[in-house]
Amino acid sequence: MSVRDTSIDPRLIESAREEFMEKGFLKADLKTICDKAGVTTGAVYKRYKGKEELFAAVVKDSMDIINSFVNVRSDIDLSDKTDEEIIDSWTMTVDYIMPVFKMLWKIRDDFVLLLEKSAGTSYENFGHDFAIRMTDAYMLYYKEAVRRGLTSIEISRKEMHILCTSFWTAVYEPFVHGMKWKDVEDHCKTLCRFFNWTKAIGMTD
């Protein structure tokens, strides 16, 4: 009985990540990936149905982190939150936003793959899809603020989506442009000065 060579998988994933990052999914060459990993194409097809499934394997761990981030903010009962906690959730501070940048910094290569190199895969609209999912989460908090009388400004879901897209694009861009961590830290501070969610939704102090 043959023993599966487990050393192949990390080599293959890393080689694929490099090829996808350099050329994007559509132009990435499976043979090049295999050659750099020191494996045969047969070894790839024993593990994955094709190049797209290999791409999904490359970004899987990072997608798990991103999905967990979204789910924590979407699958939540806000009824037991205090008014102060609801207001604080809209307050832009470095302490509140920096952990998001730190999370994305740890997965920055895969994050860029998802945003910029995924055309031709099921992730090709990742940035837009992420903004939609975050819009759903923001609407939960906004509707709770309305219910409690913390704001009287009417904001449609479409307008909230535009605001979310604008905000999260500003979060994405430092990674797309390959900023160094110090520059990302400075950008976070600028972002907190530029975006004022409490004013945007008419939050009562």
Image (cartoon, rainbow, N blue to C red):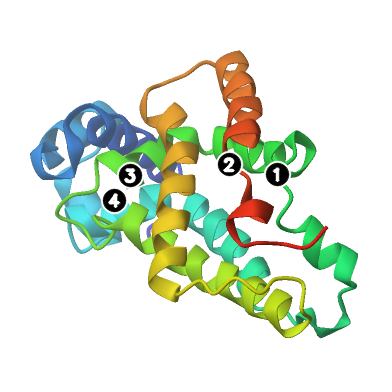
Q: Viewer-proximal residue, 162 or 56?
A: 162
Which residue corresponds to mark 3? 115
Which residue corresponds to mark 2? 195
Which residue corresponds to mark 1? 92
Q: Quadrant of the N terminus?
A: bottom left
Q: Is residue 82 above or below residue 183?
A: below
Query: Which residue type carries mark 4?
Result: Phe
Q: What residue is shown at x 15% (from left), y 31% (from top)?
A: 32
Q: Is residue 44 left or right of residue 181?
A: left
Q: What residue is shown at x 38% (from left), y 47% (from top)?
A: 58
Label 4 secondary element: helix
Could you tell me how far apart the alpha carbons at marks 3 and 1 are, in whole angstroms?
24 Å
Q: Is residue 205 left or right of residue 60?
A: right
Which residue corresponds to mark 4? 55
Q: What residue is shown at x 42% (from left), y 59% (from top)?
A: 131
Label 1 secondary element: loop
Query: Which residue type carries mark 2?
Result: Phe
Query: Which residue type carries mark 3?
Result: Leu
Q: Nearer the viewer, mark 3 or mark 2?
A: 2
Locate residue 9, reporting x and y percent: 40, 46
